[in-house]
Amino acid sequence: MPSQANIQQVDMIREHIQSADVVLLTDFKGLTVAEVNDLRQQLRGAGIQYKVCKNRLVKVVAQELGIEGLDDHLVGPTALATSDDPATCSKILTDFAEEHEHLKIKGGLLGKTVIDAAGVEALVDMPSKEQLIAQAVVGINAPLSGLVSVLHRGSPMTDFVSVLSGTVRQVTTALQAVADQKKEAESA
């Protein structure tokens, strides 16, 4: 019969895997406590959760969720880094692994697809979540700006156009501010 602690950890692992867009598996054997704390601080600053988990409990959750092929990566000490931003998560771990030879990236999950260490490194080149949002806003903003300028040239709907133009400007400004904050956080 499973212990209450194991039941709680299985629930926690399940929740992390189901709520994250990416789950990266690392082997931290050989890192000092100070190095692990530094890694946790970097990940926490980017909104990434990092938890040490028992391999057999991760296997239980993977089996429950119908994830196949993860068992090969669950050998030795394992910590899960879970995030909604695959690019940022993989970049932080990859950069840290380059500086600290003892951190090994085993692989991970992108959604429910198992990826290997090379797949994790490929995520580094992917645009961050904020960059994708900014690109979408620019794509939405261009046609709306054209519509606003057409309607603004003598149309009886001038007041409507002014309201529409202000709303687009506010959304663009807010998203740009979020992107700027993320860039400052990454460079700090």
Image (cartoon, rainbow, N blue to C red):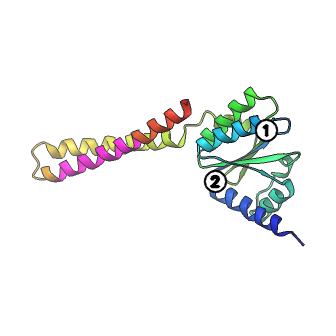
Judged by its main secondary structure, the magenta piece is helix
Q: Is residue 2 above or below residue 51?
A: below
Residue at mark 1 to residue at mark 2: CA–CA distance: 26 Å
Which residue occupies 63% across, 58% down? 19
Which mark is drawn over residue 20? 2
**Between residues 99 and 86, which one lies in front from this camera angle?**
99
Q: Is residue 99 above or below residue 132?
A: above
Q: Is residue 140 left or right of residue 107?
A: left
The quadrant in which the N terminus is found is bottom right
Q: Amino acid at mark 2?
A: Ala
Q: Is residue 87 above or below residue 70?
A: above
| Marks 1, 2: nearer the viewer | 1
What percent of the width, then of the height, locates residue 3? Answer: 86, 69
Which residue occupies 80% across, 67% down? 7
What percent of the width, then of the height, locates residue 13? Answer: 74, 59
Residue that protrudes farthest toward the top in the picture: 99
- The number of callouts visible is 2
**Between residues 87 and 69, which one lies in front from this camera angle?**
87
Dot placed on the residue nearer the N-terminal end, 1 or 2? 2
Q: Which residue is mark 1?
A: 33
**Between residues 125 and 90, which one lies in front from this camera angle?**
90
Which residue occupies 66% across, 38% down? 90
Q: Is residue 169 magenta?
A: yes
What percent of the width, then of the height, locates residue 56? Answer: 86, 57
Disc 1 element: helix
Q: Which residues are magenta?
A: 160-176
Q: Amino acid at mark 1?
A: Val
What percent of the width, then of the height, locates residue 137? Answer: 39, 44
